[in-house]
Image (cartoon, grey):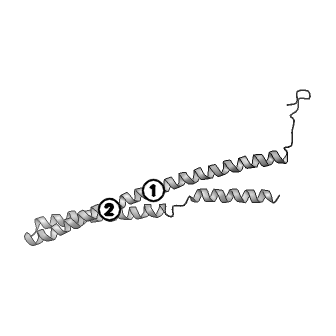
Amino acid sequence: MNERHGTAEVRELSTGELVGRLGEQVSRLVRDEFALARTELEQKGKEAGSGAALGGVAGVLAWFGVGALVVAAVAALALVLPVWAAALIVGGALLVVAGALGLLSVNKIKRAIPPLPTRAIDSTRRDVDVLKESAHR
């Protein structure tokens, strides 16, 4: 504020000051975009890891299911009904659970692929468009 007249002084910035501010703002913008990209890639990595873990659990359950079915076949030959019937029920149930976990795993992995920071890329494209538009004025 100008103390003598009680009005705010408005000073136009020189070209050098404007270029300096532009450099600072572009630098801050680039740092922020890299931070956004890093965060997004970390999230996608966690999603892929979670999907892979579920896939591993599905594989183990399927392995036990196959083992139970093999035991059921052996038991069916050895005994007439009770042991193999129980083994078939347990083996079938394990395979159903493994199938459900396998589908869940595939869905999680598909959401994490491709591992691109799409939000950061979109934001950077918008920033470049704004800079191009302002340069044409």
In-front residue for pair 18/65: 18
Q: Is residue 51 left or right of residue 40?
A: left
Task: Name the N-terminal-most of marks 2 and 1.
Answer: 1
Name the residue rendered at 32%, 59% in the picture: 57
Name the residue rendered at 67%, 50% in the picture: 29
Q: Residue 5 carries which label?
A: none
The picture places residue 28, in percent across and down from the top left corner, at: 67, 47
Q: Residue 58 carries which label?
A: 2
Where, by quadrant of the figure, is residue 62 drawn? bottom left
- Crowd band around label 2 with a 10 angstrom C-alpha radius: few (<14), some (14–19), many (20+): many
Which structural element holds mark 1? helix
The picture places residue 54, in percent across and down from the top left corner, at: 36, 58
The picture places residue 101, in percent across and down from the top left corner, at: 35, 61
Query: In the rendered image, which quarter contains the N terminus?
Result: top right
Name the residue rendered at 49%, 53% in the picture: 43
Give the residue at mark 1. 47
Which residue in the rendered view is the most extreme toward the top?
Answer: 4
| Circle 2/circle 1 CB separation < 8 Å | no
Q: In this view, does 21 lie to the left or right of 2?
A: left
Which residue in the rendered view is the most extreme toward the bottom?
Answer: 77
- Crowd band around label 1 with a 10 angstrom C-alpha radius: few (<14), some (14–19), many (20+): some
Name the residue rendered at 44%, 59% in the picture: 48
Tell me which amino acid carries mark 1: Glu
Which residue in the rendered view is the most extreme toward the right?
Answer: 5
